[in-house]
Image (cartoon, rainbow, N blue to C red):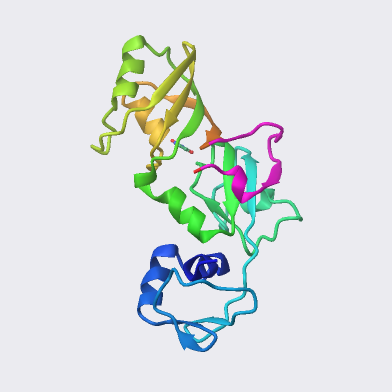
Amino acid sequence: MRLEKYLVECGVASRRKIKKAVREGRATINGIIEYNDGADVYEGDIITFDGVVPEKKVLKYYIMNKLKGYVTAMSDENKKTVVELLPDFVDKKCVFPVGRLDRDTEGLLLFTSDGDLSHTIAHPDNELEKTYYVELIRDISEEDIKALETGVTLNTGYQALPGKVEYINARAINLTITEGKYHQVKKMLRAVYNKVVYLKRIKFCNLTLDGIEPGEVKEIKREDIII
Ligand code: URA
């Protein structure tokens, strides 16, 4: 395995920071400073990073079907958090949510202990698809759908990237977007003079909520997440 991959799996830092740190001479293999992040690491080799032998972290991945009423945070003084929905089989000290859903939004929320994956997912250049089931206060018109698919301007002045709309009925659509600005779906619908009354994330990259009941959590494997 490459030195950089080994250190990523130990969770010492993000891939980018590890590459830089190795070039700076902060890693050793069997007592010798290694400047090449692509150097091979073999079973039994002793690796150090900043003078410490890092332990290989167990990387975990979970899909939650979030309920309404829970904030996406690891702790909160007054409000219930998504951590309260994590069952006992999840080590709450090692996982964190990837991205966030509003308190009143339901649906698919990924949890992991894999900082590198979380970093990749959060990077806007990757434009990963998220699909939301959206219910509306007013009927949606063909022009509104065209506007959402062309790219609306949010009330913040931000020009949203084009979304994909699947029409369900006049008051319900599936909206797929590749961005994750604060309140993005609500703001996109506000831009076409409508209002979201119910919001649920139903898909994230290739992941869906199939077989996961509201409030439930299912463990998955890294290879189940196609990025
Ligand atoms: N867009 C929103 O407006 N809210 C969410 O929770 C997620 C996407």
Residue at the (39%, 78%) spot, across then down: 35
Q: Nearer the viewer, residue 103 or 37?
A: 37
Residue at the (54%, 54%) spot, across then down: 73
Estimate the x, y position of residue 155 in percent, counting from the top left: 28, 34
Residue at the (39%, 75%) spot, across then down: 21
Rendered image quadrant of residue 46: bottom right
Q: Does the magenta portion include 225? A: yes
Estimate the x, y position of residue 110 in percent, counting from the top left: 58, 46
Q: Nearer the viewer, residue 174 or 12?
A: 12
Residue 187 against residue 59 in the figure, above or below: above
Estimate the x, y position of residue 57 in percent, counting from the top left: 62, 67
Residue 150 against residue 216 in the figure, above or below: above
Residue 6 against residue 193 in the figure, above or below: below
Estimate the x, y position of residue 141 in percent, counting from the top left: 37, 11
Q: Do we see residue 192 in this rendering?
A: no
Q: Relative to 162, is 76 on the left or the right? A: right
**Which region shows up in magenta?**
206-226
Q: How many numbered marks, from 0 up?
A: 0
Q: Nearer the viewer, residue 115 or 81?
A: 115
Task: Name the outermost residue toward the bottom.
Answer: 31
Residue at the (49%, 59%) spot, across then down: 116
